Amino acid sequence: MVKRVGGLRRKTRHLLRNDVKSRGKLSLVKFFQKFNDGDKVILKLQPNCQNGMFHRRYQGNVATVSGTQGSCYTVKLPYLGKEKELIVHPIHLFLQN
């Protein structure tokens, strides 16, 4: 049998790269931010925090917060005609203006 090549973060060298000004330590404000049910959020991966990370195919999509699960949030987003539900850490969520 042939061994499968790659994992969830395969070919993400440029996709998951932060710009020079936002590299370094995590912001505690972003880490502990709170969201309410029904808030519209943008999914953006932070490569220096791997817990609660979603798959890279959802990068940049807009989702709706539907609840909490531990320290993470459950978000629902439409994707290819279906509604997906993801469990995401708040560091990967940005409030849409």
Image (cartoon, grey):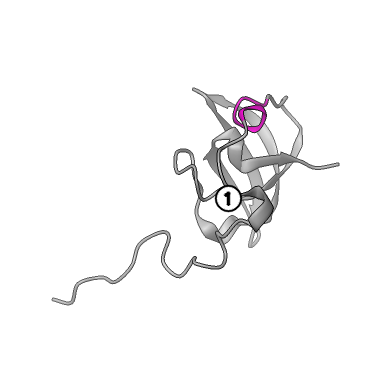
Image quadrant in which you'd find residue 37: top right
Q: Quadrant of the C terminus?
A: top right
The three-letter amino acid code for the residue at tag 1 is: Leu
Q: Is residue 90 positioned above or below 42 on the image?
A: above
Main SS, magenta region, reads helix
Q: Nearer the viewer, residue 13 or 71?
A: 13
Q: How far across and down, in percent of the image, does residue 43 sit?
A: 65, 48
Residue lying at 49% horizontally and 22% vertically, measured from the top left: 70
Residue 53: x, y in percent? 49, 45
Query: Quick one: label 1, few (<14), some, or many (20+) residues within 10 Å?
Result: many
Q: Residue at x 13, y 76 (%)?
A: 1
Outermost residue on the right side: it is 97
**Viewed as shown, does residue 3 lie left or right of 6?**
left
> Of residues 64 and 46, which is closer to you in this image?
46
Q: Which residue has dot 1 on it?
A: 45
Give the image location of residue 79, x and y in percent: 64, 57
Q: Which residue: 61% across, 28% down?
A: 28
- Reply yes or no: does residue 77 show up in magenta: no
Q: Compared with residue 63, is residue 68 higher up or lower down, i.e. above or below?
A: above
**Magenta span covers which residues?**
28-33
**In front of the other: 82 or 55:** 55
Q: Position of residue 7 (x, y in %)?
A: 35, 62
Vertical comparison of 42 with 71: above or below: below
Residue 9 in the figure: left or right of residue 42: left
Between residues 82 and 27, which one lies in front from this camera angle? 27
